[in-house]
Image (tube, rainbow, N blue to C red):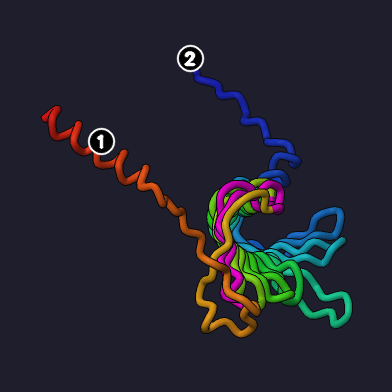
Amino acid sequence: MPVTKCPRKSEPLWKWWDWKAQKNGLRHQVYAVNGDHYVGEWKDNLKHGKGTQIWKKTGAIYEGDWKFGKQDGYGTLSLPDPKTGKYKRLYSGWWKGGKKSGYGIQFFGSKDYYEGEWCANQRNGWGRMYFSNGDIYEGQWWKNKPEGEGMLRLKNGNRYEGYWERGMKNGHGHFFHLDHGQLFEGFWVDDVAKCGTMIDFGRDEAPEPTQFPIPKVEILDPDGVLKEALAMFMKSEEEAN
C-alpha cells in the first residue's frame, strides 16, 4: 500500500514575529514604552552583559554590567546637573540584584562623598565619609549610620576614637583636644560625655593651650596603711608556698 504523509502545518506568523523579537546578543537603541532606552547585550530577552541604560524621566544614565535584567557587577550611575546639563557621577562601584552592594563611592554633593562598603543600597561595613565642612569619619557602618568602632576627625584636627551607635557616640571612647593639648577618656551616651577623666596631652605643642595645666592627683598614704597591708599580703603568699 502506498504510504501517505500528512502535509506539514505552517506555523502561525505571530510565532515567527515573537522569535524575531527575542533579544539575544548585542542590540542598539532598544526603547521602552515610557521612553527609557538601552544599548548593550541581551540574553533571553533580558539585559545581560555590558550595557548602558538611560531613564527618560530623570535623565539618569547607568553604564556597566547587567545580569538577567538588573545592574549586577561593576557600574557607574550618573545624573545630569540641573544648571549645566552636564552629567555628574553619583555612584561608582559594585552592584548586586539592582542595588549597590560591595565596595563603591557615592557622591552626595560637590564635597560630601562616601567610599567604602555597601549592602542593599545602604552603607554597611567599613567606610570613610568626607563632609563638606572638612570633617572625616572613618570606621564601621550599619544601615547608613556609624555603628561600632570608628574615628571622627574634625577640621581643626581634634578627633574622637571610640564606639558609635545609631550614628552617635555611645560607649567608651577618647576625645583628643589637640588644639588645647588635652585628652578626655570616658563614656558617652547619645553624643554626650557622661563621665571620664581629662589629662594634659601634648600641651606644649598645642596651638591654643589652656592657661593653666591640669594638676596631677596623687593618693597620699601618710600612715603607711596600704604599704603595711601589701607587706602582710606578700608574707602570707610566701608562707603558703
The amino acid beneath tag 2 is: Met
Provide the residue designation for mark 2. 1
Residue at image coords 60%, 59%: 41
Quadrant for the C terminus in the image: top left
Q: Which mark is residue 233?
A: 1
Q: Look at the image and tell me whether residue 15 can be seen.
A: yes
The answer to whether 92 is drawn above or below residue 211 in the figure is above
Q: At label 1, which amino acid type do we have?
A: Phe
Q: Residue at x 51, y 60 (%)?
A: 217
- Tell me if 54 is positioned left or right of 185 in this view: right
Give the magenta part as a residue range.
Answer: 167-192
Quadrant in the rendering for residue 60: bottom right
Residue 14 placement, left or right of 114:
right
Give whichever of 65, 47 is nearer the camera.
Answer: 65
Identify which residue, 59 or 147, lies in the foreground.
Answer: 147
Alpha carbon separation for disc pair 1 and 2: 120 Å
x then y, percent, for residue 13: 74, 41
- Circle 1: element type: helix
